[in-house]
Amino acid sequence: MTTEALARPMARPLRRISERSGLNTAAGHVLMVLLSIFCLFPVYWMLASSFRPANAMFETSLWPTTMSLDNYTQAVDAIPIARMLFNTLVFSALSTVFQLLTGILAAFAFARWKFPFDKLVYTAVALTWLVPFQVVMIPNYLLVAQMGLLDNIIALILPNLAAALAILLLAQAMRGFPKEVMEAARMDGARNWRILWEVLVPNLRGTIASLAILIFISTWNEYFWPLLLSRTAENSVVQIGIQMFMTAEGNQWGPLMAASTLASLPVLLIYIVLQRQVVQSFMKSGIR
Amino acid sequence: MFRTTILASLLALSAAVPVLAQTMAPTIDQPVTITFYNYNLATAGLGAEATQKLINEFMEANPNVTVEGIGYSSADASRIQADLAAGLPVDLVQTVFSDLDFSVNNFGAQALEDIAPTDEITAHMSGMHPNGTKLGVLNGKTYGLAYTFSTPVLFYNADLFRAAGLDPDAPPATWEAVKAAALAIEEKTDAEGFAGGITGVGAADWLFQGVVRSNNGEVISRDRTTLKFGEPEAIEAVTMLRDLYDAGVYENYDFAGALDGMASGHLGMYLQTSALQGSLVKGAEGNYELRSAAMPRFGEKPTRPNNSGSALTIHTTDPLKQRAAWELMKFLTSEHGYTIITSEIGYLPLRPAIVTDPNYLAGWIAEHPLVAPNLEQLDRLEPWDPMPGPNYRQITKTLMDAVEMAVFGGADVAATMADAQANAQALMP
């Protein structure tokens, strides 16, 4: 039996498999394109609506028949949107930095040492995740009021200095880190502080980056705490600014869409730059 | 002798009581700062601009008074609750009428009769529509002065009326006529017939109270001790709404859905507060002719519309702040105040004389005929009764959920309303 003879009967099934796989790939692509359109359409509609004048707001045409920048002008005039975006950025960035810092230190303690009641403390930290923010909102408010920090961006950040999610996620990642590497570092004379910052953290940068993105996005979208705490638009965040266009006298969709577009830009930018890490962060944390 | 002394003391005390009760300082003779919790200030709409304008004008005219406007969400008033718990000063509040009872019993709203001189109250209220001054009265005392308030108006699309072969100059005056017009619109156009703020996600009970009253029923007894929305008149009103839904002409929309449907020209008729007039006019401009009519009635029974909106309530116990808050309250509900509130936000003026006064609203009214039915309903205006006790929001929710189930959910109307009444009555104080 020649090689040719052997190859001949196999040629058809291989081609069939390859054809089937090609078809599957094409079907998969079509499905993904459809899903992408489904996901992107609301974003497109927000953008398109932000350019529609008030009397054309309810047009169903895909492309606005008349376009105007009035909604952006109105949004900028009605709320201090630049200041609100800056506040949101400071709020999100500082919350992210502090949650990572406290998370890394606490996680290292849980992962590195056995100490009395460590499991109990760890469980208590995990349980805080189950307490809705609304439950602690008023006590937190009273505390920051006593501290004289009402209508202050510091008060926005204070309850976000540490978070159970960061501690749990990082503790899990640190527990999975090879102990041999840490022991080798110890034998080379490194103490815990150096092991943490020069061995663990650089090696866990993927997890830390993912966590940072998660914290940043969730803080960016924070609504209830700033709603209660901020007394002036100048000291508030952009999510409150967007909601300000929904009034008892009707919703101002045009400026609302313009403000939403402006509010989405920084997060969209982060997503475009750090696309891979964003997807990974959502996969790792099990959030879809 | 002893008896005479006691009698003399009692007489002296009784004479002193009104003076003691009216705790307000006679004048503002030193700088004072008051807080004004206002839900319009928490928005970016015309309401915020007009409110800030009025506050600025007041501070300019009263240089000793600084008004710190604080926006809050009227949806839950959690900021007021949190600030009171934190010991922060809550001096003057724009209170939604449905929250008035809770505001009096939990937020320390003060009765005007207890803090302001009677002659000043009488002088300020002269010229106000008597039906309007009753809106903020609870247990015989005036806790709130109507500030931004309105009545239900039937907005309709005149172009759709013409397309359906209806006469836009003769809008439906009864619920039977609403049904007939809505059926014609549904049949002869692509549009939908009718929607109302009576039901739907986020609808408070203000409009429902008016509908039930217009059928000579009540949602709650006059003394606010017994719920009555499970009684025959209320059941008949809900059955009428169910009939509209079963006929396919009453759309089950939430607030935004119905408002946008009307603004976009896809809805024939919309019963809602006239405060939405500005939003509807913006949508209609260049697209269709928007008109308005009075709230529909049941057969020949005259309608008994009630108000939506808010009152101003004074909460401070500090005499100087009370005076400052009272002066601001008077300014906001003056001829000038109501002119701004009506022309720039869209609410009703409580002072009928300014409607025809060229110095105030005459010119604006001539240019905005949509407000006419709203003004006409002032003469039949009744208060939006606040539910009593700490469970007042749960009582309202129980009621509105039952209405929703009875109208749209296919549930038995009488049984659903009776059950809800029994459940809600258990929540009453």
Image: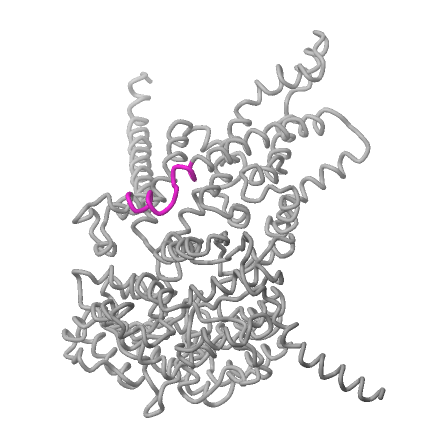
Percent across and percent down for residue B157 are: 21, 71
Residue at 56% from the left image edge and 54% from the top image edge? B30
Quadrant in which residue B223 is drawn: bottom right
Q: Main secondary structure of the magenta part?
A: helix
Report the span colored magenta.
Answer: A73-85
In the rendered image, is residue B70 in sight?
A: no
Q: Relative to residue B154, is residue A132 drawn left or right?
A: right
Residue positioned most to the top = A188
- Identify the residue at horizontal 33%, vertical 66% (top origin): B339
For the residue pair B387 and B339, the one nearer the viewer reads as: B339
Please check the rendered image and state whether residue A79 is part of the magenta-colored stretch, yes or no: yes
Residue A74 percent across, percent down from the top left: 30, 47
Which is nearer the eye, B251 or B295? Answer: B295
Name the spot of residue B165 as percent of width and height, x first. 14, 79
User: Which quarter of the image is occupied by the C terminus of chain B?
Assistant: bottom right
Residue at 59%, 78% in the rendered image: B423
Residue at the extreme front of the image, as rendered: B1
State the quadrant of the N terminus of chain B: bottom right
Residue placed most toward the observer, A141 or B171: A141
Q: Quadrant of residue B126?
A: bottom left
Residue B62 is at least partly visible in this image:
yes
